[in-house]
Image (spheres, rainbow, N blue to C red):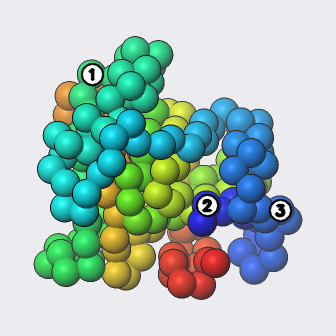
Amino acid sequence: MSRLRIFSENDPATPEFASHDPEAIADELRAIGVTFERWTAGKPIAAGASPEAVMDAYRADIERISAERGFTTVDVVSIAPDNPNKEAARAKFLEEHYHQEDEVRFFVDGAGLFTLHVGDKIYEIECCKDDLISVPDGITHWFDMGAEPRFVAIRFFQQPDGWIGHFTGSDIAGRFPRYTPEASV
């Protein structure tokens, strides 16, 4: 289930706001320029579906958001608990960074935790199946897929070389709890 918690950057233990309501999540994130939407597949998706089948099932939404925002590349990424590179994949995103283009992810299945650092607030968004999040360029954030990652996501890029993170060198990500999906319900 999707969840948003908002913290003071100095108090990772006490949320100032918490909600599982998609409309409340979208409203809070919209206030900081972040898009949060819920999508449904235009066709059934079977477990283990090919990237092409996944994108075909969401074709209308993919085309809409690509046209609205100028995305030139769309792909599908899938990470499972048995992935031999899961620790390295997780570590790549755990430190605070930003991009020079919007980071847009749609969760076809599974879940992950986006944490945004805006002003003196930390916005912790657990994205689950059917969630789309769009983090504007320049917003510092980190992503945690958990120790046993399981998700399939559609990624959107404006630049053909895809994901380029610019790391801040801050230790703030290490001061907030890591993602444990079972603890978030």
Cα distance between the residues tagged 3 and 2: 14 Å
Q: Residue at x 70, y 43 (%)?
A: 26
Q: Is residue 89 above or below residue 44?
A: below
Give residue 80's quadrant in the image. Answer: bottom left
Q: How many neighbours does mark 2 have within 10 angstroms: few (below 14), some (14-19), or many (20 or more)?
A: many
User: Is 108 on the left-hand or right-hand side of 40?
Assistant: left
Residue marked by disc 3? 17
Q: Residue at x 58, y 40 (%)?
A: 37
Q: How many neighbours does mark 1 have within 10 angstroms: few (below 14), some (14-19), or many (20 or more)?
A: few
In percent of width and height, residue 159 lies at 27, 26
User: Is 19 on the left-hand or right-hand side of 47?
Assistant: right
Give residue 182's quadrant in the image. Answer: bottom right
Rendered-image quadrant of the C terminus: bottom right
Residue marked by disc 1? 72
Residue marked by disc 2? 2
Q: Residue at x 50, y 41 (%)?
A: 39
In the image, which is nearer the foreground, mark 3 or mark 2?
2
Cα distance between the residues tagged 2 and 1: 28 Å
Cα distance between the residues tagged 1 and 3: 36 Å
Q: Is residue 59 above or below residue 99?
A: above
Q: Secondary structure at mark 1?
A: loop
